[in-house]
Every structure is written in C-alpha cells, then in structure tokens.
Amino acid sequence: MKQIILSLLIAFSPLLSQAEDGHALWLRYKPCNKANIIAPQGGPTLQLAVDELQRYWQGPALKLILNPNLKDDDGFIYDGDSICAHSEIGLLYGAYEALRIQAQEADPGLGGYTAPKFPRRILDHWDNLDGTIERGYAGRSIFFSAHLKGQAWANRIKEYARVNASIGLNGSVLNNVNAAPKVLTAEYIDTVCMIANVLRPYGIKVYLSVNFGSPKALGYTKTADPLDKSVIKWWREKANEIYKRIPDFGGFLVKANSEGQPGPFDYGRTHADGANMLADALAPHGGIVMWRSFVYGAKHKGEDRVKQAVSEFKDLDGLFRSNVILQSKNGPLDFQPREPYAPIFDNMSKTPQAVEFQITQEYTGQSKHLVYLAPMWKEFFYFVSPDSLKAIAGVSNVGDDTNWCGHPFSQANWYAFGRLAWNPSLSSDFIAQEWISQTFGNEVDSYALADMMTTSREACVNYMMPLGLHHLFAFDHHYGPEPNGFKAEYPLEWCPVYYHKASKDGIGFDRSSTGTNAVSQYREPYRSLYNDLKTCPDEYLLWFHHVPWDYKLRNGDTLWDELCALYYRGIEQVISYQKLWNKVRPQIDRERWEHVNTLLGVQLESAEQWRDTILRYFQQFSKLPIKYAYTDIAYPAEPSVSTIYDKP
Ligand code: BDP
C-alpha cells in the first residue's frame, strides 16, 4: 500500500504546486501567448523587449516605435497602447514599465516622457575571484564561481541581467574594490568578456575594480608610480587589450591608499595623478574611472576620520580629467544606520561626482534583519541634489542563494536602488508598494506592509544607534554591538570607544567648532545648524556634540531618558512587525511567510541584545535608572524622522 501511495505521489508531483523559493523576485508576470506586439526590425535588445511582451503582455495590442527625434538618454514614452523611444534599450525599459504597471493592475497614465535621472546606474559587486563575497550575505559570487559552470553559469547571469534591466540598471562592477591584480590577466579578461556578452543585450556595461599596484604586483614593472613611463605604458596596453575583447567596457573603479590598498601616495603622488593616469589609458575608448574618496589613515592620519576625505580631496578639485568621477559613500564614515550626508558633496564643485550606497546590509542587520533602505537613500537626496551627480552606485546584495539576497525583504533594497537610480523623487512608500504587489501579489495588504518597510530603517537606528551614535559595532563582522570595543593593535578609527566617547560627564563626539570642527566642511545652513547644540537635529546630536547625560532635549526629556526610550521603541517596532506579519499570514505563501517569520524572531533577539548591551554599558557612566519597560511606554505620536526627509 505504502508503495502505491509513494508511486502515486511521485507520478503526480509535478502537478503539486511548486514550493515558493523567492527566486522570481519581483518578476512574476503571468504568461500569455496571445499578445499582439507590433515592432520594427532591430537588434538583440529590441528582440528581448518583443519576447518579454509576447510572453506576458495581456492587453490587446502594443506597438513599439523607434523615434530618432526623441532624446538619446534611455528614456521612453508609454501610454498603454505604444512604447516609443530613441533607442532599443529605451524600448526594453518601456516594456518593463508596461509589465510593471500591468502587474499592479495600475493605470498607465497619460504617457509622458520618462528618462533616468543618472546616466550611470551601477551595481558594485564586492566579489572575490575565489567566489567569496566581501560583506556578502546571500551565498557566493554568481560571476566567479567554480561550481556553477557552462550553461548554468551563463543562465544565472542572464537572469541577473534581466532583473537589472527591469529596474533600469545599466552597469555592473564585477569584483571587489579590494581588488586582486589577477583580474587583469588574460584568463580573467576572458571571463569578463563572457559576462559582458551576456549582459550586453540588456543594456548593461561591465566595469572592473582594479588594484592600483597591478603592473608591479603582476611582475611587469618595478613600480606602480603613476608618472613612471613603464607604468603608463602598461595601463595603456592593458586598456587596449580589454577594449579589443569588450568594446563597450565601462571602465575602472579604484580604491587607492585606503585600508591598506596601494595608491599614488606610495610614490609621493596625488589622487589626481593616479586617477588621471588611468583615465588617460581609458579615454581613447570612452571609458571612465570611478575613483573612491573612502580614504582615511593615510595623508591625514590622526585627524577626525569623518573629515579626512574632504581634507585629502578638496585641493584637487578641478584637477581631474573629465572622464574621472569621484565616488563617495553617502555618509562621511561608513554605511552606518544613520549618518549625516558626506560633506565631500559640498566641496568638489568642479569634479563630477557619484554617490555610493550600500545595498548589502553590512551595518544594518545583514541578511537577518528586515531593514528597507530606501528611506536612508531618500534622506541623502534631501541634502544632496541628484542633479549634482553623474552616477549612482550601490554595493550589491546579490549572491548565488536561490532567492538572490538572503532575506526575502532584502530583495526590496535591490529593487528600490534601481527605482531611485531611475527616479530619485519617487517616495520610499511608493516604491515599497510597487515592490510588494509585484513580489507578493495584489491581494496582500500592501499599505500595512509598506508601512512596516518604511519605518524599518528608523527602527534599526533606534535599536542600534539612535541620536547620532555611530560605529558601536563588534569588530570585523559588524553585526552585533561592542560598545567597549578597543584594541590597541587596531587603528583608533575602528574602535567604538573612539566614536561614542562616553564618560561620566556625558556622551558624543564633539565635531562642532569647539571640537574637531568637522561642521566647517558643510555648506550653510547646515554648518551653523549642526554647529549649534540648540539647533542640531536630535538624530545627529551625538554625531556632532558631546553632551551631559542630563542634557534636556527639545521634547523636554533628558538625553539619558530619550536614549533609553529610543532603544525600547526600536524593540517595540520589531514586535509590531511580528504582529503585522502574523496578520498577513493568510495572504502570503507558506515558504516565504515562514522564512520571514523566523528572521523576524532573529531580528527581535538581536535588537534586544543591542538594547541591553548598549544601555548596560552606558549606564556604568550615566549611573541613571532605565525607567522604561515594554508595558508602560507611551510614545508621543510625532512623525517619524524618515517621513520628514522622505518627500517625493
Ligand atoms: C567597509 C567594509 C569593508 C570595505 C570598505 C570599503 O567593512 O569590507 O572594503 O568598507 O568600502 O564598510 O572599501
């Protein structure tokens, strides 16, 4: 009998519904084979647009039109009946827009012209050549993989390309900024060429991170001095070699003289000398250099770490070639849950600039916490106008896990990055709702889930580092708290005690004009606003000021009480997400519901650990009681900080 049941089960198993593994991300269009797509003849990119629509378009007929009179900027017009664009890639983006609107059962509207805000919309992968990923929390590299070979390898990369094209991304830096020189050898250029061939029809260019010391490290030159003739020649020839194989290669991303990486300082040269030498090698082919400003502990060693980028680059403004873009993290420290914007954006008016966001959640719970990052990126755009930027880069959270990103909700950060790269004026809430209905279907309570998502970053700030605290992370892994962190053998800038400066007198880092004067690097009105304790926003308070434990905040609470309240509020927020997740259970498939439910449990446990570790540690100095407990907190119903910055 058992045998018969088993054989029946095996025979009918294909009919049983497939387990939901999250692999499809937000691309869950229903197949339809009756679509009438009218399109001109074209190349592979146009063919992709036609194929997607033929497979999934549910409407009566859809016309694709190439119009050379439209602007050549990846934009398109979609009005429900037709998609019109200057280029094939515009039509492909238009096709995904049409399918996105269809999936949400939304109205296409009047069909105005839409084009991306940033010409370069790039994912930076921190993939190592051995297949591991620096700060990757979702498996191994999809590019440099020993186990995924041949067709399976190419298929995964093709899927990746399609996902990126669906949100308008057009560049991928394939390897870690801590770059192995070996990536420039013929063997790897071969691999990169194969990847470029897969990405090309989707409008995606490949870029490489390069190690500044490559010619020397690979044994071709005696030095890596950017003014040395043999070095200049080597890079020129290397660029020629790459472009011979990959004519549309995007260019190089460089981390130089930062965290132990080689750079022009090693030879008494400047960042401009280094960047320009590479830029000259790439220029004949149309390539660019993305030179990172994430530097500390080099020329300005000993200075307040958050000031060092401006100190090092300010005098070089205007000295870079036109194909160099200076790439800076959104905050002046390092992808913390909250930082004020990086003042380098106020100091380099003659240099093309790019912002680097971190999609992979190194400091925001990795792939264990539900933290939707769009509100953090919107906060940055509140201070730094997208108009002033030439490119946008996001450190990717993609790995070879079946669901790509680890946490099912981390997929939303990939999605949001693409949507904001296209249109930074979309609100976090709008993007969350789009993502939810495409990812979980139109039957789920997208308002409630979007509310959870849009408050989740503030929750993370609350239970990790409220009121402008920063870098209280445990060494190396950057997941949990280690407020007493100090290691004599480490640079001071890696030690939490350097940042919070807690003592019996108070807490916080004085960066006002009476402290390190980091405020002087900001434009007005922010310089004065942050400098004055009375006007400094609470969310940046301990970033800019050292204040006594009984300091009275604007809401009348003392600093200590508010600090405690915020840690407790963070926990309450996570508990409220658990409750909500239970409520939407009937609307979500079992697999993803359970996965997220388990992770919310992990998140709550971590959040409690954060609260308890941090408050207990600071209490040694404040010597004040914690007057909160879950049961008796009454929070004022004020708008969350995120909503203040999150203007569409
Ligand atoms: C830090 C990471 C480190 C990166 C570095 C960078 O901890 O792994 O190499 O940034 O951006 O956040 O270069």
Image (cartoon, rainbow, N blue to C red):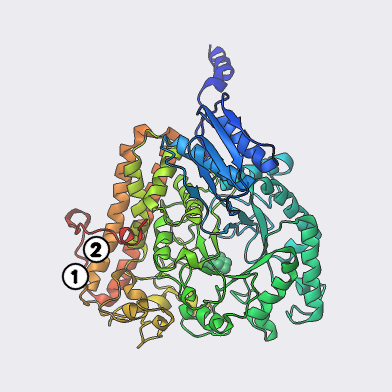
Ligand 1, seen in the image, is in the quarter at bottom right
Cα separation between marks 1 and 2? 10 Å
Image coords of residue 120 (percent x, y): 58, 59
Q: Which mark is residue 557?
A: 1
- Is ligand 1 less than 8 Å from the beta carbon at label 1? no
* Marks 1 and 2, the one that precedes in the sequence: 1
Q: Nearer the viewer, mark 1 or mark 2?
A: 1
Disc 2, SS? helix
Residue under the point 80% across and 58% down: 244
Residue ID for mark 2: 565
Disc 1, SS? loop
Rendered image quadrant of residue 31: top right
| Mark 1 in CB contact with mark 2 (< 8 angstroms) | yes
Residue under the point 40% across and 73% down: 484
Image coords of residue 2 (percent x, y): 53, 15
Image coords of residue 335 (percent x, y): 47, 65
Residue under the point 24% across and 71% down: 560
Residue type at mark 1 is Asp
Rendered image quadrant of residue 613: bottom left
Is residue 607 among the parts visible in the rendering? yes
